[in-house]
Image: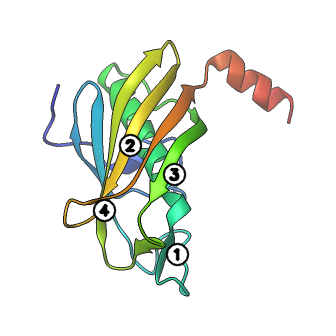
Amino acid sequence: MIQTIYPEIETLLPHSHPMILLDRIILQDDTLIISELKITSKSFLFDADLDGVPAQVGIEYMAQTIAALGGLEAISIGDKPPIGFLLGSRRYKHEGGCFINGHCYQVRAGELMRDDNMAVYQCQIFDENQCIIASGQVNTVVASDSMLKAITDNN
């Protein structure tokens, strides 16, 4: 189902600021989500020497976009956003050295495969000219209660 008005990003992710790196969701349907963010000097992980955010942070932008999809799915059935983990990424490529200060970016994540609580997404990050500047596959898992218990019991 495509919505036009989305909840605040803070309600969709199981994090708090400054770890929330996205600004908002702009589109979502059953297997696709698009988020948006603007880079400023106050952006988390901003590097003044680069005048932007390092390219490798794009993987986290992708992961948070996927997490927001999980948050939207959970909220739609009355649950809270689940805790998930980034298992890895494949073929991450970024054109350029960083996400540039003052620029807006769209992050698109499309589900390729889902098996129970594990999923694979094809992700792209687009610049203001709608050019793909980063892409890759992201593998995720939504943590079950038993998985979370095992993690917290060991700490």
Label 2: how many Cα within 10 Å (few below 14, some 14–19, many 20+) = many
Q: Earlier in the sequence, mark 3 or mark 4?
A: 3
Q: Please provide percent x and percent y for residue 149.
A: 74, 23
Q: CA distance from mark 2 to mark 4?
A: 13 Å
Look at the image and tell me in which quarter the C terminus lies.
Answer: top right
Q: Inspect the image, locate mark 4, and give the three-letter code of the amino acid beneath it.
A: Tyr
Label 2: element kind? strand
Residue named by callout 1: 46
Q: Inspect the image, locate mark 2, and give the three-letter code of the amino acid beneath it.
A: Cys
- Residue 60's label in the rendered image is 3
Q: Inspect the image, locate mark 1, and give the three-letter code of the amino acid beneath it.
A: Phe
Residue named by callout 4: 105
Q: Please provide percent x and percent y for residue 106.
A: 29, 55
Residue named by callout 2: 123
Label 1: element kind? loop
Q: CA distance from mark 2 to mark 1?
A: 22 Å
x 52%, y 68%: residue: 44
Residue 142 falls in image quadrant: top right
Q: CA distance from mark 3 to mark 4?
A: 13 Å
Camera sees residue 18 = no
